[in-house]
Every structure is written in structure tokens, then in C-alpha cells.
Amino acid sequence: MSNKEVIRNPIKRIFDIIFSLILLIHLCWFLALLILIAAFDKGKALFLQIRIGQYGRPFTLFKIRSIHSSNGTISNYGRFLRRSRLDELPQLLNIFLGQMSFVGPRPDVPGYYDALQGESRKILELKPGLFSRAALKYINEESLLAKQKDPMKYNDEIIFPDKVKMNLEYYYNRSFFGDIQIMAVCIKYTFLRFF
């Protein structure tokens, strides 16, 4: 995190550090259990991928593996992890390390946010987040794309531009209390969707 961003948003960063640390300490046994089951289920427990972070800097995103590394299939356990979003719990470490925040645009692979032009590049000033309104809107993105004749084209022409629009709106209207509200709505919706 740059000194400029710390000065601009100290409460957000302090919240990220304290809350992620509390969750990591209290959920370490549960996270270890999920990783252990994933190791037995898929051979490799963690999924590491380069994503684009704040100011276009790449970082390694941590997830629990939900797809078999050998044949690319998703097991029942993998589906459970994805549906519950528990596969994203290791990103608490990304938040603690300052690579992500609790709220912000979901981090994408190279070739998307880092390729934006003009005003849209303001999104790169934000830290990627675990939660966002755009991620909530497209919580069923995988199944939506599966129904398309050309999923990549649909993503590039429909979904991604809409995410950019929503994330720009967040950029201009963000606040600490707004972040708390986004977190609450996302957690509530994920909980209701799972149960």
C-alpha cells in the first residue's frame, strides 16, 4: 500500500488489518480443515493465480482449489466450496498483507483492468476486494456464462463493461460506512443463497 493511500484512507486499512487478523486467528482451524479436505479430494489444496492489483501491480491470489488439477472436473466438495464462497477464505491473507481490501473491485486476471483506458483506469487506484456490488450482481456468473454460445465474447462485451461501470460508481461514491453496508449485504446474500 502506498503512503498516499494510507493517508487518504487510514480507517479502511486499519479495519482491513484488524478484522482480517481476527478472522484468520479465529478461523485458522476451519481454514486448515477445508484445505486438508481439498488436499485429499483434489491432490493440490491451494489454487494460486496472478491477478491485477492496485495501480496495475500483479499479485498472487490465494484460493482453496475447487477443480481437480489433473482432469479439470469439479467435485461435489468443489461445488460446495464455490457455492458457499468458502474457497475464497484464504484471501483474508491477501487482505492482511495489503494486496486486497474487504471491499473493492474483484481482482481479475491480466488483460482486463490493466488494459482499461481513459476514466475507467481510475478503478486501478482501488485495491481489489473480497466483496463488491458488481460481484454480488454476478454471483451466478459461471452458470450465466455456461448458457452462452460464446462465453468469452459475452463476458468481454456484456459482463465486464457492466462491472467497470459499477466499479467506477463505487470509486466516486466510496466511504467506510458504505463499505460496511456492502459487506453486510454480500454476506447476508451468500448466507441466504447457501441455505
Image: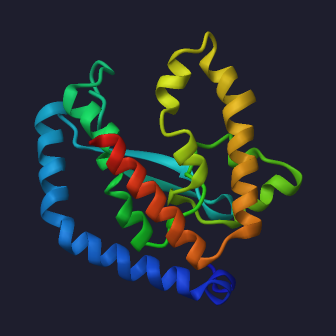
Q: Is residue 31 left or right of residue 150?
A: left
Pinpoint residue 122: horizontal percent, then vertical percent: 78, 61
Asked if residue 47 is positioned above or below residue 122 in the image, the reply reads: above
The quadrant in which the N terminus is found is bottom right
Q: Is residue 60 left or right of residue 9?
A: left
Residue at image coords 19%, 72%: 26
- Residue 127 at least partly seen: yes
**Residue 58 image offset from top left, x and y in percent:** 57, 55
Q: Residue at x 54, y 47 (%)?
A: 135
Query: Vertical placement of 112 versus 69: above or below?
Result: below
Q: How did the renderer colour the structure?
A: rainbow
Choose between 83 and 96: the one closer to the eye: 83
Q: Position of residue 100 (x, y in %)?
A: 50, 65
Identified at 44% across, 53% down, the residue is 61
Q: Residue at x 75, y 57 (%)?
A: 168
- How many numbered marks are there? 0
Q: Quadrant of the C terminus?
A: top left
Residue found farthest to the top: 149
Does the image show residue 1? no
Provide residue 52's location: percent of width, then percent of height.
60, 52
Using the rendered view, name the quadrant where residue 39 is placed.
Answer: top left
Taking 53 as reference, is 30 left or right? left
